[in-house]
Amino acid sequence: MFGYVTIAPDLLPKERCDRYRSFYCGLCRALRQRHGSFSRITLSYDLTFLYILLNSLYEPQETLGLEHCFLHPMAGSAFVVSEAAEYCADMNIALSYHKCMDNWQDDKSLMSRAEAAMLRSSYERVKARYPEKCALIENCLKMIGELEKAGDPSLDGAANLTAAMLGAVYRYKENDYWADTLSQMGQGLGRFIYLMDAYEDLPKDLRKKRYNPLIPHHQREDYETFARECLTMLIAECTEAFETLPVVQDADLLRNILYNGCWMRYHALQKRRDKNKPAVVKEGTV
């Protein structure tokens, strides 16, 4: 989907990176078993994070194994699966399907339209299992589209709708003791993801004259500081809720993602932009 919610591998020892990879492969396996091989193209870092989070919080029975696939035909890949993987696989399908539809509507991407068509039957099964969640996702995306079409100048409008959508996805068990806290995490992460996506897409959206909530702010002298402070505030909503959860198992992976991995694309953008800036020639050096 967006790919912002991933690990910072350079800050983890190899065995912990391998543990993260086993969750990623476990989610891939759950997708194949529930929705067929094609569904694995939707495999998302964002939902891998949710899988690790739910697995750490609820500590369900884990099944460990080694599986050979087309990406790892010889050595195979280690995986870990639990009941949380099934839920995350279904939510992965729901969000990916609508992401494809959004790409088709925005960019007329034929590839996205074809992918959505291939995912349609899987999405209908997910919708039958989680009708309220899928209805909320559909309604939020419809309202986001209306706000974007109207050119809503607010930073909050579409971001809050993304927050509502992710908040519902993170609410794993509706009447559970931790449901509200998980929902708060999803809401903060949803706002962060929406704004980070807008920040990354701003140059392209300016060129193509497309909607972006940061356009009214991009000519500010302090634009970069403004954007960074907004993003920091939004991810803090997520981390503050996270720190109240009694997670122990794999807490290091979760903190690595929230405090470092979520910023990797941002830092990569800064490096790329700094590299492309024209060099400043100091007086007296020519």
Image (cartoon, helix red, strand yellow):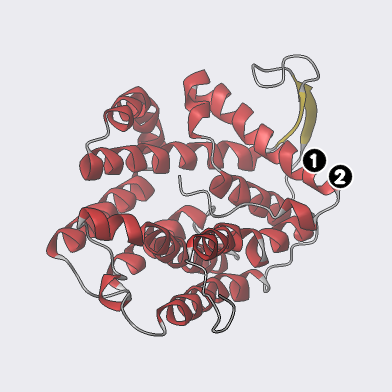
Which residue shows up at 43% across the image and 67% down it? 191
Element on which disc 1 rests? helix
Above-or-below relation of 223 to 105: below
Q: Position of residue 61 (x, y in %)?
A: 76, 40
Q: Position of residue 154 (x, y in %)?
A: 26, 75
Residue that mark 2 sits on: 15
Tag 1: amino acid? Asp
Asked whether, in this view, residue 93 is left or right of residue 242, the answer is left
Whole-angstrom CA distance, mark 2 to mark 1, is 5 Å
Q: Quadrant of residue 53?
A: bottom right
Amino acid type, label 2: Glu
Q: Which residue is mark 1?
A: 18
Observer-nearest of 286 and 110: 286
Q: Is residue 219 left or right of residue 233?
A: left
Vertical placement of 185 versus 281: above or below? above
* Badge 2 vs badge 1, beta-carbon distance below 8 Å: yes
